[in-house]
Amino acid sequence: MTEHTPARRLDEFKPDARFAWCVTGSGHMIEESIDLALRLPGVDLFLSSAGEEVLPLYGWPVPKLREHFRVFRDNSASSVPVGMLYQGDYHTVVIAPATSNTVAKCALGISDTLPTNLYAQAGKQCVPGIVFACDTAPSVITQSPHEWVEVRPRAIEFENVERLARIEHTTVARSLDDLKAALDQRLSNLGLAWNTSSS
């Protein structure tokens, strides 16, 4: 069995290092995820093309996001913003919410979007990643832009979540509570605290 490289030490990041929060094309818990991002200290948003399409459907067009975050869009073939990971600008990569497509790509080492590229390069830099997987229960009630719908994930979705959970430097959140707990733990490790206001 291969021994995993330990996570990077805190002194290897810049003093003003930030969270890199990635949004993919899922509407599941997207408003709750953005609310958590607003409460964290120092967050930059990284949007997949699908994420950029979906966010306005839930009241978050890019101009509104830019009132609260630095926003990076998926508009370069080589995912240029990923280079900031190598400079120690980001101490944590979060993908929330993560579509089953994104989970599968991350689990199989495919990095062809800005979020999956950030996740892969974070792993290679021993930077912790937190992935909020949407398809983790036999039946999920989720909010579409116009109504609540039931989604029944397939066995392959569950297999990919389990595969992803085995990858080093990765924490898989299977619920909003799991995501909060993972962020709590990361803040504690970094000696940081939640913002008292999201404004």
Image (cartoon, helix red, strand yellow):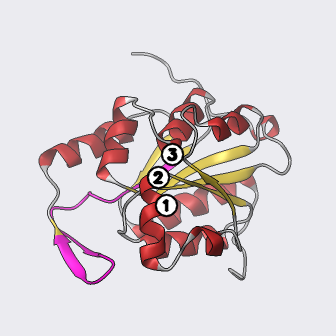
> Label 3, label 1: how many angstroms apart (C-alpha)?
12 Å
Give the number of the disc on residue 49.
2
- Residue linked to disc 3: 115
Query: Quick check: marks 1 and 2 in contact, CB under 8 Å?
Result: yes
Going by the numbered disc 1, the residue's amino acid type is Glu
Using residue 189 as the reference point, say whether residue 24 is left or right of it. Answer: left
Decide which of 70, 190 is in the foreground and name it. Answer: 70
Q: Position of residue 128 (x, y in %)?
A: 58, 42
In the image, residue 136 lies in the stretch drawn in magenta: yes
User: Which one is earlier in the sequence, the residue at label 2 or at label 3?
Assistant: 2
Decide which of 156, 128 is in the foreground and name it. Answer: 156
The residue that appears at 40% across and 38% down in the rendered structure is: 106
Query: Quick check: marks 2 and 3 in contact, CB under 8 Å?
Result: no
The residue that appears at 56% across and 40% down in the rendered structure is: 118
Q: Please, is residue 27 above or below residue 75 in the view?
A: below
The image quarter in which residue 127 lies = top right
How many C-alpha atoms fall within 10 Å of the one at disc 1: few (<14), some, or many (≥20)? some
Q: Which residues are magenta?
A: 130-150
Q: Nearer the viewer, mark 3 or mark 1?
A: 1
Q: Nearer the viewer, mark 2 or mark 3?
A: 2
Using residue 165 as the reference point, say whether residue 183 is left or right of it. Answer: right
Tell me the element at label 2. Answer: helix
Tell me the element at label 1. Answer: helix
Tell me the element at label 3. Answer: helix
Going by the numbered disc 2, the residue's amino acid type is Ser
> Label 1, label 2: how many angstroms apart (C-alpha)?
5 Å
The residue that appears at 34% across and 31% down in the rendered structure is: 108
- Residue linked to disc 1: 52
